Amino acid sequence: MTAGETVFRHTDPRLGEFALRTLDPVGDAALLHRWVTHPKAAYWLMQEADLDAVVTEYQRIADHPHHEAYLGLWRGRPTFLAERYDPAHVELVGRYDRQEGDVGMHFLCAPTDQPVPGFTRAVITTVMTWLFADPSVRRVVVEPDVDNRAVQALNAAVGFTVVGTVTLPTKEALLSTATRAAFTAAVGQKGVPA
């Protein structure tokens, strides 16, 4: 895929159009640097990263055969980051009971001084809808920090079930999974890929 290519569009009934496009590790680095080093992004674990470290990290992801990063747009403006990874090769290798059709996910909303009610939920719903648009995906796997209560509540709201804790090199994580059926039931959304 070409950097900057739109790969998915989703319309939230209340907030309008969201989209995902491929990330440009160099061209998007300054924007990403502002996001990942912001105090609200503490759980992203890049607080001390300089611009070169951000380029290096996202170039590493771009070059990885089992990890991808995408810039999320709301109404055409960059507002979030989404990552998709294969937990058989990245992040959770050998640390959980992997099933065929599992896909890992990370997302980060851009910091803002003007929060929009429901925005973060619309972002995670967009990301989950995108992941489940791939018919090979049966279950989404996440591993937020055990102390990140806000994202745990958001995960539960879109159908994730806690599996248990797992120790990763950078954190103690709360492993959670969501099946397509659990996601569809939680968001009550018609048109979620079957």
Image (cartoon, grey):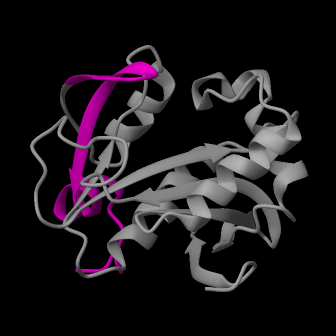
Magenta segment: does it hold 177? yes
Q: What's the residue at 75%, 79% (across, down)?
A: 4
Q: What's the residue at 68%, 59% (across, down)?
A: 59
User: Bounds of the magenta span?
Assistant: 165-194
Q: How many marks?
A: 0
Judged from this view, the residue extending furthest toward the top is 147
Image quarter where the C terminus lies is bottom left
Q: What's the residue at 65%, 22% (across, down)?
A: 42
Q: What's the residue at 70%, 67% (across, down)?
A: 23
**Does residue 97 appear to the left or right of 4 in the view shown?**
left
Q: Is residue 31 above or below residue 39?
A: below
Q: Is residue 164 above or below residue 19?
A: above
Measured from the top left, where is residue 32 in percent x and y? 79, 48
Image quarter where the N terminus lies is bottom right
Measured from the top left, where is residue 78 in percent x and y? 80, 61
Q: Quadrant of residue 54?
A: top right
Question: Is 187 or 138 nearer to us in this picture?
Answer: 138
Quick check: can you spot residue 133? Answer: yes
Q: Quadrant of residue 9?
A: bottom right
Quick check: can you spot residue 118? Answer: no
Q: Quadrant of residue 173?
A: top left
Q: Is residue 23 above or below residue 92?
A: below
Measured from the top left, where is residue 170 in percent x and y? 46, 22
Measured from the top left, where is residue 168 in percent x and y? 35, 25
**Does residue 23 appear to the left or right of 157 in the view shown?**
right
Magenta segment: does it hold 67? no
**Does residue 62 appear to the left or right of 86 in the view shown?**
right
Question: Is 17 or 42 nearer to us in this picture?
Answer: 42
